Amino acid sequence: MIRNQWYVILDSRQLGRGRPLGVLRLGERLVLWRDSRGAAHCIADKCAHRGAALSAGEVLGDQVRCPFHGIRFDGEGRAVLIPANGETAAIPPNFSLRSYPVHEARGLVWIFWGEGEAGDPPSFFEDIGPEFSYSSWIDHWACHYTRCIENQLDVVHLPFVHRTTIGRGGATLVHGPRVEWKGDDLYVGMRNEVDRGQAPLAPEEMPELDPRRFHLQFRMPHLWQNWIGERLRIFLAFVPVDDENTLLYLRFYQSMVRLPPLRGLVNLAGKLQSIVIARQDKRVVLTQEPRRSELKMGENLIQGDLPILEYRKRRAALKAEAGQS
């Protein structure tokens, strides 16, 4: 995982009030809870006293209380009360835990994972406005998150992995694809067609990317949308659990149908179709070796893999910037 980045770790609906929630994310045990105002907090899920899981405890006001000896911690990870020492006793400085800046928006909970300053809060895809409704689904994939991301940047696999769904028609020839970075966003323009002996266009021969036409958009470090049309999108957050496991937070967004009864049916149908497509991907991605992808790993890439190569290069640069090998 790339340090000093904002990561989605939960859907807001997963974090209720009144009880702490323990999760494994980014290879670390975390506990989250909502304070008396409903604001979310996140600290390490390991009591500074004797290592009990705070997520097995309870929320008292704005704090979380350890189930073992009642020690209470605030949202900054500082112990504020050690009951055995008395209410007026000073708190030793070593009774503190790592805390994580939290940002909540668009029904998602982000944390800043790293040592540096959190800086500006993360942003969602700005062109998915309030007129969109959505259905959602969470799926566990037993692989490194980089493999999941690269699958959604892979424009070559469609007629093979998805030959009964979005890859119907046998359009195996891949023109380009055209790629363009805009800040931390990678845009991918693609065109596949049936191979009749013609040569594929080189990336620079492809038409310039038009944000109002079908394209893929990936935002570092782990958000993706399939821009199908002005009123139709598929969103994915690839949430790292650890080096062997990833959670896919999927949303089917649409603004075509807004009447509540029909809207729900359309959203459900879109979600079910998205699940079928994702499961087709999953069956193959889980077989890939090595389990994690890196910039240099002995693969033989082809022209159609350009989006994957661009992602790997940017990921390697961000890791180097964060002091990671």
Image (cartoon, rainbow, N blue to C red):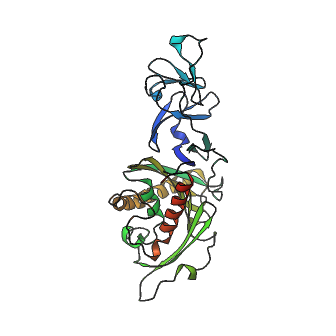
The location of residue 72, given as percent across then percent down, is 54, 21
Residue placed furthest toward the left? 287
Residue at the image point whose x is 43% and y is 65% from the top = 296
Q: Is residue 263 above or below residue 72?
A: below
Q: Is residue 312 above or below residue 6?
A: below
In front of the other: 136 or 321: 321
- Horizontally, residue 1 falls left or right of residue 141, namely right
Residue at the image point whose x is 46% and y is 74% from the top = 304
The location of residue 243, given as percent across then percent down, is 40, 49
The location of residue 132, given as percent across then percent down, is 61, 55
In front of the other: 3 or 101: 3
In front of the other: 237 or 137: 237
Is there any visible trace of residue 171 in the rendered image? Answer: no
Residue placed furthest toward the bottom? 197
The location of residue 124, given as percent across then percent down, is 62, 53
Quadrant of the rendered structure where residue 33 is? top right
Is there any visible trace of residue 66 in the rendered image? Answer: yes
Residue at the image point whose x is 50% and y is 11% from the top = 84
In front of the other: 93 or 259: 93
Count every numbered label the image shows and give the total.
Answer: 0
